Amino acid sequence: MFKYIFAHLNFMSKSIFTAILFVFFVSVTSFVNTTSEPPFRRIESPEISQKREFRGVWVATVANIDWPSKGGLSSDTQRQELLDILDAHQRSGLNAVMFQVRPSADAFYSKGREVWSKWLTGEQGNAPYPFYDPLEFAINEAHKRGLELHAWFNPYRAAFSLSDKVHPNHISRQKPEWFFNYAGKKLFNPGLPEVRAYIVQVILDVVKNYDIDGVHFDDYFYPGQEGGRAIPDTESYILYGRDYKNIKEWRISNVDTLIHTLSDSIRIAKKHVKFGISPFGIWKNISQDPEGSVTNGGSSYLEMYADTRKWLRNGWIDYINPQIYWPFQHRLAAFENLLDWWGNNSYGRHLYIGQAVYRSMENVQGFRNRSELPNQVRALRSNPRVQGSVYFSSKSLTKNLAGFQDSLRNNFYRYPALPPQMLWKDDIPPHSPLDLSVFIKPFNNIQLNWKEPMKARDGETAYGYVIYRFNADEQINLSDASKILKISYDKTLRSYNDTHTQKGSSYQYVVTAIDRLKNESLPSNIVTAQSF
């Protein structure tokens, strides 16, 4: 993620993303638009009522980018900061958070085999005090707010800097032969079978022990070469690469093997857990491969050995989330070219576009026009092969850079949305809630009550519910997201109070059930009520 955060300045510059530069971007909370640069093209605003759309945000913990604000805060302060973040994103209409739980072979959770992260407690290996489990807390609070939680792992980084103080129980101290140093970082050697097995087990700890909705990787695989220096894995290649034509082919196979093995392992452990990858925005350029994109920048395939297109084609991942952090008409990597290329190469899996909110205040081509990001949302919504967006990063949204958070709240995400269905994982909807009834209370308060649905043929009942309200003279239309009062991920919910009614107005209500993968039932029986 952060390796290429300034790739628009120098495509494959490997300069370390620094906290100082990031703070510069996220601390700007207002702007004066003095530019007369017109938008790239006129895009008619689509309907704002998107019933199905993935609306995600990255919450980065590495270097305390988004949360917690610094290491070593009290548990109460950490929890309150996270609640404030989740509340803000709920108000903005989002429905998913990519929550970074393993930034450097360390943990923001207790039920695993790796040491506590220094970015949580200030010193690696120290548990939060008083004790709590940040991941468990984040999951519970996200679900209360109708947000999916995807656990975001960095698979190969072991130390953000070689000067980092590493705990004696850290895996790099326990198994030093598994690692190499490169470009100022300590990294797992992806060519070692025991490394791949270990990483899979680390992630399965979380899949098995926590109620996550997805497993998420960003763009860190092999390190891109810096300064012409070779990656120090020749000895491993001699041991394990004899069946490959060259070291590059072997490296690609190593990453493929990890992704394929992890994909199968997640599905066996919990079939509903999604698996997604967020690569650098360019797979290959057309100059490197006739099937590549019309771009001229760094390639995740050739420089990080990540064949994400193959992972989609083979069905190893459920979604791809390319980081398309450039504007329309960029001379090296135009947003519109990459949007179209990924849409044409998603192979029926979900495509969510990674968008750079942190860039929205930059005085550069494209982003001088403060409508750049809104126009990108309109463009991706006009592509039927795109199912949503993920924004980098949380703080850039909550700081309302270029007013983009306002655009989401007042326009694009004004109404709630369900995440898109993944029919290859589950195509059986739940049955409808039973016996919906209404109880009219004073002071414009209408209470709905219902019973749990019968089990569907896959044995599921309901993971949650969607409550709809229509005016008395309206047709019941479940595709109209503006009629949704609430999306709940609480399977125990059996009632709902509508306190936002107009005195003397008559309404119709229906409730649907959703399962874990957000398949939706047919509506319950219709009930009508008049507020007084």
Image: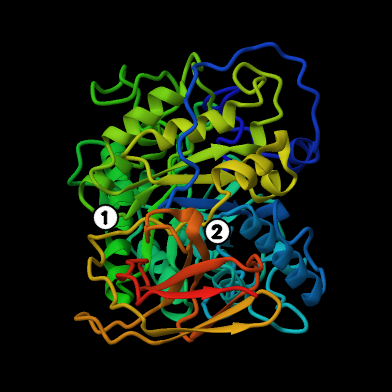
Quadrant of residue 479 within the rendered picture: bottom left
Q: Nearer the viewer, residue 291 or 508?
A: 508
Q: Nearer the viewer, residue 133 or 162?
A: 133
Image: 323 above or below 115: above
The crowd level at tag 1 (other Cα within 10 Å; few <14, some 14-19, many 20+) is: many
In the displayed structure image, the side of residue 54 where residue 351 appears, left or right: left
Which is in the foreground here, disc 2 or disc 1? Answer: 2
- Per the image, the residue denoted by label 1 is 316
Question: What residue do we see at 63% from left, 23% from top?
Answer: 367
- Per the image, the residue denoted by label 2 is 97
- Horizontal and vertical percent position of residue 21: 75, 36
Question: What residue do we see at 36% from left, 81% from top?
Answer: 433
In the displayed structure image, the side of residue 470 where residue 521 appears, left or right: left
Image: 386 above or below 113: above
Residue 426 in view here: yes
- Horizontal and vertical percent position of residue 191: 35, 52
In the displayed structure image, the side of residue 388 where residue 100 appears, left or right: right
Image: 5 above or below 186: above
Q: Amino acid at mark 1?
A: Trp
Question: What residue do we see at 58% from left, 54% from top?
Answer: 93
In the displayed structure image, the side of residue 77 where residue 396 appears, left or right: left
Q: Quadrant of the C terminus?
A: bottom right
Q: CA distance from mark 2 to mark 1?
A: 22 Å
